[in-house]
Image (cartoon, helix red, strand yellow):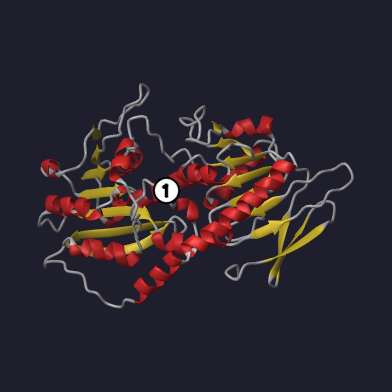
Amino acid sequence: MFNRTYDSEFAEAAQYEEEYENSQMFSPRFRRYAEELSDELIATYDLPHKNVVEIGGGKGDFLRILCDRGKNFGVSFGPSYKPERVDDIPTNVRFIVDYYTEKYASEPADLIVCRHVLEHFSSPRDLITTVRKVVNNRKDLSIYFEVPNGNFILHERAWWEFIYQHCSYFTKKSLVTLFAECGFKVRGVRERFGGQFLTIEACAASSDGSAKNGDCGELVETAALCEAIGPAFNACVANWLDYFGKQRADGRRVIVWGAGAKAVTFLNIVDPGRSVVSHVVDVNPRKVGRFIARSGQEIVEPNALRELRPHVTIVMNPIYRGEISRLWVGLGSTSNCWPPNIPEQAAATSTIFLERPTWASQVVDRAVAMTSTLSWISGPSPYRMRCLPKQNSISLRCGFRSRWRFVRHARYCN
């Protein structure tokens, strides 16, 4: 999949520069993923005391983990790297502020890693071809690439994953085909991080690497899913605009959790005038004090919630809801911000509405989970919820003995 209207000149004007900040390592959930992935690569490719090259590694967060846990030597390539004054760069990690090209073929490498870079190429074959030339005929040099999972985006209707800088999206078939046609032997392709990431591991192929056409069933399915994007996206946006209109009319405070690309897309579409969402929370301290591009919401740290006390918090990525729930408790909330036994994948694919009633002077918050990429959690409340499965619905009981039931989506089933 690719953006047919992608303008390379416009993208060049908005390219990533030294001030670009996108580290996710401040999230315990994401850091655990990175550490587990690092350990897996070290074990799979016998990496202790080896050389690792990372393409487009930013500040080298993942490379540092890989070199620290495996006692490896690493070099990171990328034009956006800028050392911080307090950055203690390990002696076994180097940075080259440049694009990775054939002129660096002499750089020692036992593993080449490239995570979340390929989707930024309007001609992704160019990068894979460059890497193949560098690998040459070395069968002992392994390749690991990681990209957003196009299958996940289409099937789960994760519309906020579509951002302008991501001009190429890959399904399993298209990713395998690309590497095979560029002369690689694919060792494995799999989904990771709750299905949101698609990874491929490869090495130099002995033959010309021509890909087999095989069954075109996936191509037909992918085409159908792409055709459905327009109507489904328009309906999704209409629902959000309607919901935000009601929140504005009721004078309710709404914030977003997660100041990444998804939040930028979401807020510039559904609240470009900052009339409903006042702030965006992020655990990355480097983002705090900055603002969401164009829509202008201020980015604050989690502790700011003590003062903000939002009625509704929109979580841009439901995979972090457990982590956010624990932070809520640490900030003094006495309620669970998500029913505890709803499976992670189900929460990512379901539309759930939970209405809390109003009792006399006690106004109780409304928690909503809408669309495939957004979870909702309620603000601080004196009531603790527990989730009770019951056939094709879920019931929630609270301390004041009130009860709600809401129907699950077709996909929300055991």
Residue drawn at point x = 81 percent, y = 44 percent: 363
Q: Residue at x 27, y 48 (%)?
A: 113
Marks counted in the figure total 1
Could you tell whether 401 is left or right of 72 in the image? right
Extreme residue toward the top, this view: 85
Percent of width and height locating residue 171: 36, 63
- Left or right of residue 249: residue 224: left
Most distant residue in the right direction: 360
Q: Is residue 228 above or below residue 269?
A: below
Quarter of the figure with the N terminus: bottom left
Residue for point 24% across, 53% down = 123
The local secondary structure at tag 1 comes to loop
Is 282 on the left or on the right of 7, as rendered? right
| Residue 373, percent from left and from top | 53, 54
| Residue shown at 56% from the left, 37% from the top | 280
Tag 1 residue:
163
Residue in the foreground of this view, choosing between 373 and 335: 373
Which part of the image, by quadrant, shows the C terminus? Answer: bottom right
The one of 310 and 275 positioned closer to us in this rendering: 275
